[in-house]
């Protein structure tokens, strides 16, 4: 009898550990805000938050409202993928309205009022942005973040100077392509990068490029996100490529996109405006 009781106690202990493990399994949520043809994407593991880009000049308040609704009072990290107006325009209001612990951005320095406004906002927030000149890996909570920098100068294309971000959490993966166009995407395809992911944020607001099919085949995502708008929708040819591969596709033209990656599963939903 004592032996049986001991075995039962061991079994209950193992079950309790299993339940604790299930409860503590990390989940990654990717939320692409519905702010028109612009990017602002929130990544969370439930306890830590990373924001990628800040939308257009008029989007700062919308981004702050979305963060507040998500219960985010502080950002562990902000990543500005590149310096186009539809990625950094809302940065001044964002940086004035929420605390951020760390900011990273590309090393190139364009000329333009929105870039200067970003620098002034960083200074006003007491933040010294890290300018990345080489691929960088860092951890934010349960999120393992790889930031891939361009290897060529791409002086004629801000888009191809985009930082590309891979986020892994709980055995799941999201890949966010910024506005990478053909040259930058080809660099990744030919450079030995592991592009396989569960969710792919497609580059450049749903534009079709010569590398689009190759990117989809290399990434093989279960779900794709497009940051487009009703005025500037994703191109039909790209949507056809996605449909032919059976990839579930959600577009910010239809509302904020929220994808949760957990326990090997992908749950995607649209949150109407």
Image (cartoon, grey):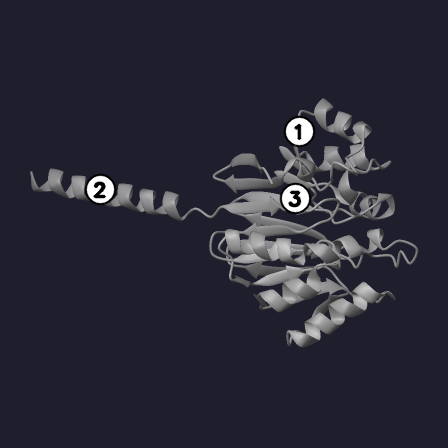
Q: Name the secondary structure under disc 1.
A: loop
User: Height in image: 120 above or below 173?
Assistant: below
Q: Name the secondary structure under disc 2.
A: helix
Residue at image position (71%, 53%) is 55
Work out which residue is located at the far top of the displayed protein and give it: 244
- Asked if residue 232 lies left or right of residue 167, the reply is right
* Gap in angstroms between the C-alphas marked 3 and 1: 20 Å
* Residue 35 percent location from the top left of the image: 68, 47
Disc 1 target residue: 247
Disc 3 target residue: 34
Q: Earlier in the sequence, mark 3 or mark 1?
A: 3
In front of the other: 249 or 60 = 60
* Gap in angstroms between the C-alphas marked 3 and 2: 47 Å
From the image, state whether disc 3 or disc 1 is nearer to you. 3
* Residue 205 percent location from the top left of the image: 76, 42
Tell me whether circle 3 and circle 2 mark residues in contact (CB < 8 Å): no
Residue at image position (79%, 32%) is 213
Packing grade of label 2 (10 A; few <14, some 14-19, many >=20) is: few
Quadrant housing the C terminus? top right
* Residue 257 percent location from the top left of the image: 61, 40
* Gap in angstroms between the C-alphas marked 2 and 1: 42 Å
In front of the other: 164 or 43 = 43
Disc 2 target residue: 12
Q: Earlier in the sequence, mark 2 or mark 1?
A: 2
Whether residue 68 is visible to the viewer of this picture, yes or no, is yes
* Residue 269 found in image quarter: top right
Work out which residue is located at the far right of the displayed protein and give it: 156
Q: Earlier in the sequence, mark 3 or mark 2?
A: 2
* Residue 45 percent location from the top left of the image: 50, 51
Residue at image position (21%, 44%) is 10
User: Height in image: 85 above or below 240?
Assistant: below
């Amino acid at each position: 009898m004592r032996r049986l009781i001991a075995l039962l106690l061991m079994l209950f202990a193992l079950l309790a550990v299993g339940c604790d493990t299930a409860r503590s399994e990390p989940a990654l949520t990717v939320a692409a805000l519905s702010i028109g043809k612009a990017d602002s994407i929130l990544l969370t593991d439930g306890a830590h938050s990373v924001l990628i880009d800040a939308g257009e000049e008029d989007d700062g308040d919308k981004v702050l409202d979305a963060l507040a609704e998500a219960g985010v009072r502080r950002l562990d990290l902000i990543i500005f993928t590149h310096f186009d107006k539809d990625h950094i325009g809302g940065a001044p209001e964002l940086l004035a309205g929420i605390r951020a612990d760390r900011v990273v951005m590309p090393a190139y320095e364009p000329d333009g009022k929105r870039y200067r406004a970003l620098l002034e906002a960083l200074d006003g927030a007491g933040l010294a942005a890290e300018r990345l000149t080489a691929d960088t890996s860092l951890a934010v909570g349960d999120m393992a973040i790889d930031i891939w920098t361009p290897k060529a100068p791409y002086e004629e294309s801000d888009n191809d100077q985009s930082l590309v971000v891979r986020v892994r959490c709980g055995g799941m993966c999201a890949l966010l392509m910024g506005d990478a166009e053909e040259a930058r995407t080809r660099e990744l395809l030919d450079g030995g990068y592991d592009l396989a992911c569960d969710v792919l944020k497609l580059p450049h607001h749903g534009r079709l490029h010569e590398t689009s099919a190759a990117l989809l085949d290399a990434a093989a995502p279960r779900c794709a996100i497009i940051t487009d708008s009703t005025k500037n929708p994703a191109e039909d040819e790209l949507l056809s490529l996605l449909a032919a591969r059976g990839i579930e596709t959600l577009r910010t033209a239809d509302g904020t996109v929220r994808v949760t990656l957990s326990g090997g599963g992908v749950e995607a939903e649209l949150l109407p405006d």
